[in-house]
Amino acid sequence: MEPILLRARGETNSRSISTYLRLGGYGALKKAFIMDPAAIREEVKNSGLRGRGGAGFPAGVKWGFVPQDSPKPKYLICNADESEPGTFKDREIIHVDPHMLIEGIIIASYAISANTAYIYIRGEFVEEARILEQAIAEAYKKKYLGKNILTTGYDLDLYVHRGAGAYICGEETALIESIEGKRGLPRLKPPFPAVVGVFGCPTVVNNVETLACVPHIIERGAAWFASIGRPRNTGPKLFCVSGHVNRPGVYELPLGVTFREIIEEHCGGMRDGKALKAFIPGGSSAPVLPADKVDTAADFDAVAEAGSMLGSGGLIVMDETVDMVWALENLLTFYAHESCGQCTPCREGSDWALDVVRRIRRGHGRPEDIETLQRIARYASQGMTICPLGDAFCGPITSFLNHFGHEFEAYIEAATPAPRKKLPILPVRSGRGTFGL
Amino acid sequence: MVTVTIDGHEVQVAEGTNIVEAAGKAGIEVPTYCYHPGLSVVGQCRICFVEIEGQPRLVTACSTPVADGMSVLTGSERVKEARAAVMEFLLENHPLDCPVCDQAGECYLQDYSFEHGLDTTHMVDERRTFPGFERRLIGPHVVQNQNRCIQCTRCVRFTQEISETSDLTMKARGNHSYIDTFNSEPYDNPWSACAADVCPVGALTVKEFRFRARVWHLEETPSICPGCSIGCNISLGNLKGIVHRFVPRHNPEINGWWMCDYGRFLAEGLNDRDIEQPSRADAQSEERAEMSWAEAIDEVARLIATGSDVQAVVSANLPNEALLLAKKVLADHLGARVLTPINDGEKHKIKNAQRQWIGSVDSHANSTGARLIGLPTGDQDALVKFLESSNGPLIVLDNRAHPWLATDAAAAALKGRPLIVLARTHTPLSRHAAVVLPLASWAETEGTYTSSTGRVQLAQRAFFPKAGAKPAAEALLLLGARLEAGTDPNLTPRAMFEELAAEVPAFAGMTYRRLAGEPGVPALGFEEVAHVG
């Protein structure tokens, strides 16, 4: 497939506006401005573009939820808080082609009649925030942003908002709270952000990759976009491959390519010729899949059918040397650290599950621990929590136990009882001197 | 109005009501930790799960508004399992130190654990603790034990939404988040102890009440705060005749769910008493001679007869019934000149259930009642002038009716006059009075009080007066009988209130039953000056 989102990769000075213009950039914007906003929404809906942030919700449908008759200002937020372990695609887009993202933001803002847009970027992305600031300054200079863009009478201001590095701020309502200057805690839904979002106004939150697809859809048409990939799973997708492959990195491939193809053809196969043991298809919160599912097509529906989710497209490959108990402990350490602490099941469950898995890995597991883990996973997921972070750590627990339960059992069989903590015996002072109890 | 079915019971509730309130109306309790009717809804403790028939997922009852025709199950198997799981999550890191926890007995963790929890836990690992946060005085009145906290953020929301001081905040993240004061300043606002009230567990407790009594031993009596003219509703907790605490009692029209620290910590002062029997000054010695009430009333009658220009100072802290009797016996029958001194005092304010501020107009619990009954009122200057205008016998009901009366200056100004003083604790004035009558404390008095917003409210008697003390109304009844004013010495407070309702137009149509059932009955013809700021 010809590169679409990463077409500028390899160009010298690919981030500058002159390179972007030379490659035909901001052409879609000019085309969009002669279209009606409703027609743009329709076009994106027809393209079948699904949100690339993880949930895979159709972007055009999401834009349609914004009440156009509302007297309140509308906002567009670009979610660049890419903090899911194993995911680094948005970073690549910002590094290679920030203007593609900015053009997508302008078109999307125009489509929902927003006059203010934010790019919420995670705090650790210092370099990326600088790149975006520079690109935005260039766009302002060339009148693609600001008042009366390209003399159309449409105004748009775009701001970069740097987060402080919390994983939870990638959740759209927590992100909104964070932009408002509060603690990044997810909100109760409903109301959804499309109705009550940032500062109480209708807001659309889209992922970087989603917005980067928009100029291409406008420029080349919904039908062209829908012809890439498979029905209901259309368009190009960036896959971030990490782990035990020969060439880890970001690959742009049509949706529906199989994981085997990604690993063997594009990533040069497994490292050191070792056998594949398991892979996590969509960032660390997606349930793990065993090696025999490697022929699954990498699209939203097929992966869901296989018992996992495509999520953000962060493919984590594990070879036969990986200790799955250790891997789960590693994942849970992240989630226990990143749970926001707002609602009970996730706050308590994430830490508890980590304690249990860590104890098993240290050789002090008990047969009941498997049941405890399953119980935590059952009651901290599927609507028991305010936001999907509960599901994010419960998915791995359930899938690791389902597919690799025997490794946990082996650990438990070889376990020794946990050493009992002895209370220190303090000397008791009497009139006659000191003696031990 | 919409009709919803809760566990098969149909109830009609206003649109937008949440399931917790609707179930409450049907008489079904849905457990809640983070939900408080006076605070915003956050839906984060997850204990209030209920099942809506036809919906695949359980919903939190606090954050889900009812819809017409909705059928809610609060006790289905799925709900029970979910609640048990949430209870287990909550108790997983809880120290379970109930035997030494002062919240025990009014702790929602105990109650709901018993009702909805498992009888065991799957937890074998070490509990999370917050070293250094176990017994921390975070402000003048509140002690924090972070180990017991369930992170419901009720206290944080109280300081944001009710006291509007935002002094408490959640710090850190996840399982290690904890409550701390903002900027590490002391947690000090005029309503600070309410944060301990809203705390459903023992994480925040009131310093003054800690370890004074086990709450299940306390006898709680519905009463009114004696602190100022607002008339916050309180529950007065006593153990064997010793008042241990005031806690706010819900009244949507006056104090909502709250009360100020000033009023709350008046509780301990009600136990002070150094006058136990009637006594008279002895000409020969410094010691006062004790006597019986009958002798004392005779002595009072004799003293009154010694002069022509009799004066009386009547406190605006006395209940309506006593004020009416003072007017009837002293002013109308005896012809005494009466003054009710008013002290503006410190200003207090409180938020009602509609989140409107109500401010105090003066420091007396019943100044409005005194005005409605028709007693003349005046400030300190008027009081001094009033007392200078005569040399005859003076009846003081009671010796703390105005702060000036408790000063040495007052005692010096009134020296030599035949003084009859009703008092609970001595002031310079009472030490030299010809006759001192022991006055029952607030907790020992039953009566009605009129708030500055014109609401008549009933404060019940918590226990019988100690030693020889009597409420002011009883003393006036005895005196009235002795002076042949036509009062029945055995009148009960309820009968006195009926008399008040019959005689004073502002109280027309009021009965004890109405006072008990309504959030204070508005006095008739009283312009609602709520002093809402």
Image (cartoon, coloured by chain):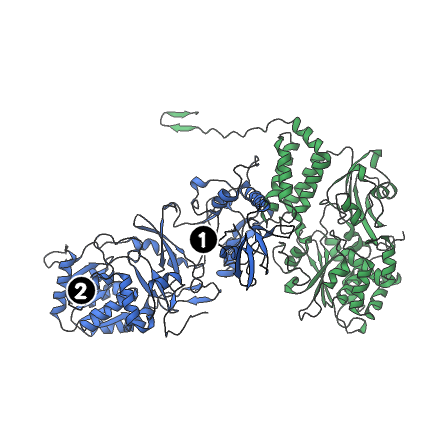
Chain colours: A green, B blue
Q: Mark 1 falls within which chain?
A: B
Q: In the shown orientation, is residue B414 left or right of residue B104?
A: left
Helix, strand or loop under label 2: helix
Instruction: State the mark number for residue B479.
Output: 2
**Residue A238, horizontal then vertical, whole percent:** 81, 50
* Identity of the residue furthest to the right in this view: A2
Q: Earlier in the sequence, mark 1 or mark 2?
A: 1
Instruction: State the mark number for residue B197.
Output: 1
Is residue A83 visible in the rendered image? The answer is: yes
Is residue B226 visible in the rendered image? The answer is: no
**Residue B121, horizontal then vertical, whole percent:** 55, 37
Q: Nearer the viewer, residue A131 or B399?
A: B399
Q: Residue at x 24, y 67 (%)?
A: B325
Q: Mark 2 falls within which chain?
A: B
Disc 1 to disc 2, C-alpha distance: 44 Å
- Mark 2 closeness class: few <14, some 14–19, many ≥20 residues within 10 Å: many
Q: Dividing the image into 4 quarters, which one contains the N terminus of chain B? A: bottom right
- Which amino acid, mark 1? Asp
- Mark 1 closeness class: few <14, some 14–19, many ≥20 residues within 10 Å: some
